[in-house]
Amino acid sequence: MNRAGRTALAVAFLIGLGAPLSALTIRAGLAYGPRSINDALLTTTYHPGSVFTPSLELGFGRGWFAGVAYETGPQMSGALGLYDSPAVFTLSGLELFGGYEFRMKSLALFIRGGYGLYSYKQSVDYSYVQDFPVDGTGSAFLAAAGLKFYPWKFIFLSAEAKYISLRVKPYDRSVDLGGWRLQSGVGFAFDF
């Protein structure tokens, strides 16, 4: 994690230390939706995929929260090269974030920002490129905004737009794996 990521996490932690523990909330959620990738060649080859994100949040104070999420999705399949060799691509990552939720009765608007550690892999079924695997990791900032609807005190429905700014350079070409994630989900909230 670079210096800016460590600083952002330290600030979120220090804000949390100042929050009263009497207003503690734990939220566990599950979201699903489409994922876009900014790189035009990858988008043409694999077409936009979907993403599945379980998350765990700790709410403290008056609207502040911090959490962790794991973004993953199914393998994206396509064909590469002159001979349309079969290829698969995967992208997943662990995200740490902090944010603020403005709650009005059963509706809550939120914003959050964080840092993600992602892994990616591309496999091509062609003998001449099998010695050149595309398999690596990268890190990036993320920003999201959305809303949560609480039909009951302990259950929420969510909708979120998230942007990830992930760039990697597996060989001599920079690849932009960042993009938008538009997700909806459901979760449980427990107040203490």
Image (cartoon, rainbow, N blue to C red):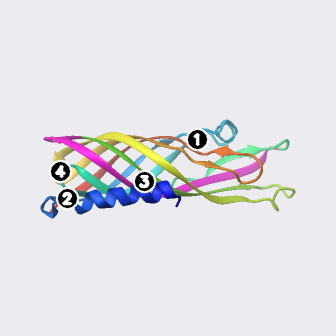
Amino acid marked by disc 1: Ile
Indicate which disc, 3 or 4, sits on the residue closer to the N terminus. 3
Q: Which one is in front in this view, the residue at disc 1 or the one at disc 4? A: 4
The alpha-carbon separation of the residues under discs 3 and 4 comes to 25 Å
Name the residue tied to disc 2: 19
Badges 2 and 4: C-beta atoms under 8 Å apart?
yes
Amino acid marked by disc 2: Ala
**Residue at (24% x, 48% y) in the render:** 156
How far across and how far down the image is residue 179, in percent? 54, 40
Amino acid marked by disc 4: Arg
| Badge 4 element | loop
The circle drawn on residue 37 is: 1
Indicate which disc, 2 or 4, sits on the residue closer to the N terminus. 2
Image position of 48 (left or right of 183)? right
The alpha-carbon separation of the residues under discs 3 and 1 comes to 16 Å
Image position of 168 (left or right of 108)? right
- Front residue of this view, candidates 51 and 56: 56
The alpha-carbon separation of the residues under discs 1 and 4 comes to 35 Å
| Badge 3 element | strand
The circle drawn on residue 152 is: none
Which corner quadrant holds the C terminus? bottom left
**Residue at (48% x, 54% y) in the render:** 4
Indicate which disc, 3 or 1, sits on the residue closer to the N terminus. 1
The circle drawn on residue 53 is: 3
Q: Which one is in front in this view, the residue at disc 3 or the one at disc 4? A: 4
How far across and how far down the image is residue 14, in percent? 30, 60
90 magenta-colored: yes
Q: Quadrant of residue 124?
A: bottom right
Image position of 156 (left or right of 160)? left
The alpha-carbon separation of the residues under discs 2 and 4 comes to 8 Å
The alpha-carbon separation of the residues under discs 3 and 2 comes to 27 Å
Please report the bounds of the magenta region as a residue range: 84-108
